[in-house]
Amino acid sequence: KIEQYLLEKSRVCRQAPDERNYHIFYCMLKGMGSEMKAKLGLGLASDYSYLTMGKCTECDGRDDLSDYSS
């Protein structure tokens, strides 16, 4: 299922303190199997400066693993 979302320009290049980038990146890195991550050369969200600018890789009230699976 594909859903359309508004692109927030402010999240493309930077994040405010305690804010994350687009949730899909965190969901993928949390939920994707280790074999697929290795094949794609991916690591943890904390490995990427693009995903850690807001000093926040976890989000209260969100379950990245569950979101990835659904």
Image (cartoon, rainbow, N blue to C red):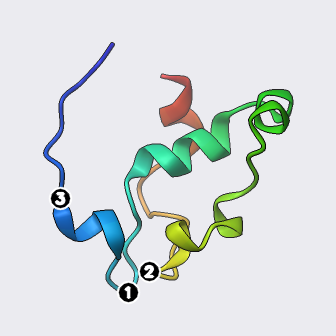
Q: Which residue is mark 3?
A: 8
| SS category of the residue bearing label 2 | loop
Q: Which residue is mark 1?
A: 17
Which of these two is toward me, 58 or 45? 45
| Of pointers 2 and 1, the one earlier in the residue sequence | 1
How far is the residue under mark 2 from the one under mark 1? 4 Å
| SS category of the residue bearing label 1 | loop
Q: Position of residue 20 (x, y in %)?
A: 41, 67
Which of these two is toward me, 23 or 62? 23
Residue appearing at x 28%, y 66% in the figure:
11
| SS category of the residue bearing label 3 | loop
Q: Nearer the viewer, mark 3 or mark 1?
A: 3
Asked if the residue at tag 1 contacts the one at tag 3, i.e. Cβ–Cβ closer than 8 Å, the answer is no
Q: Nearer the viewer, mark 3 or mark 2?
A: 3
Residue appearing at x 76%, y 53% in the figure:
43
| Of pointers 3 and 1, the one earlier in the residue sequence | 3
Q: Position of residue 5 (x, y in %)?
A: 18, 38
| Residue 63 visible in the snapshot | no
Residue appearing at x 47%, y 22% in the figure:
70
Find residue 54 and name its label.
Answer: 2
Which of these two is toward me, 68 or 16? 16
| Residue 54 visible in the snapshot | yes
Asked if the residue at tag 2 contacts the one at tag 3, i.e. Cβ–Cβ closer than 8 Å, the answer is no
Asked if the residue at tag 1 contacts the one at tag 2, i.e. Cβ–Cβ closer than 8 Å, the answer is yes
